[in-house]
């Protein structure tokens, strides 16, 4: 999170794809170049490395919140497209036979 307007207390929360590639340039562009290699933020765990099965390891920006009962580590990649489809359909009440037909048809 980044404070946008100190007068109103407004904040901006960014989600950045390929943050290891674009974050330093973005930080410089908004006049916050010191954030690109902030040692304190790195020590706090703000830039974790995520292991992705298809794209390999990459750095990302962790969620800025720390909650004791609901951890948000930000270190797991999103599931592959369609990876959760069968379980979502089953949870919605679709029978196994129909799910198998849909999977076979690549729907």
Image (spheres, helix red, strand yellow):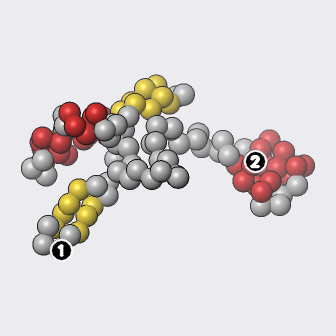
Measured Cα–Cα span from mark 1 to mark 2: 46 Å
Is residue 13 visible in this depiction of the protein?
A: yes
How crowded is the residue under tag 2: few (<14 C-alpha within 10 Å), some, or many (20+)?
Answer: some
Q: What residue did someone put label 2 on?
A: 86
Apparent side of residue 106 relative to residue 7 in the rendered image (left or right): right
Q: Quadrant of residue 22?
A: top left
Q: Is residue 83 left or right of residue 19?
A: right
Lateral position of residue 51 relative to residue 20, left or right: right
Furthest-bottom residue in this view:
8
The location of residue 69, given as percent across then percent down, is 52, 52
Residue 64 at x, y percent in the picture: 35, 51
Q: Earlier in the sequence, mark 1 or mark 2?
A: 1
Q: Where is residue 47 drawn, in percent x and y?
A: 33, 37
Q: Secondary structure at mark 2?
A: helix
Q: Viewer-proximal residue, 8 or 57?
A: 8
- Residue 55 appears in the rendering: no
The residue at 12%/72% (across/down) is: 7
**Looking at the image, which residue is at 70% across and 49% down?**
85
Give the mark count: 2
Q: Could you tell me which residue is drawn at 38 percent across and 53 percent down?
A: 65
Which circle, 1 or 2, is nearer the viewer? 1
Label 1 Cα crowd, 10 Å radius (few <14 / some 14-19 / many 20+): few
In this rendering, the answer to whether 45 lies above or below 63 is: above
Q: Is residue 56 above or below residue 92?
A: above
Image quarter of the N terminus: bottom left
Q: Which residue is mark 1?
A: 8
- Toward the viewer: 28 or 55? 28
Q: Position of residue 62 (x, y in %)?
A: 38, 43
């Amino acid at each position: 999170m980044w404070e946008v307007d100190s007068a109103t207390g407004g904040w901006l929360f960014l989600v950045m794809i390929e943050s290891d590639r674009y974050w330093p340039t973005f930080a410089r562009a908004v006049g916050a170049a010191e954030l690109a290699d902030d040692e304190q933020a790195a020590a706090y765990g703000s830039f974790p490395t995520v292991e992705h099965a298809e794209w390999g390891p990459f750095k990302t920006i962790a969620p800025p919140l720390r909650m004791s009962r609901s951890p948000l580590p930000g270190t797991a990649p999103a599931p592959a497209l369609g990876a959760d489809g069968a379980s979502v359909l089953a949870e919605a009440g679709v029978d196994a036979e129909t799910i198998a037909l849909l999977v076979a048809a690549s729907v």
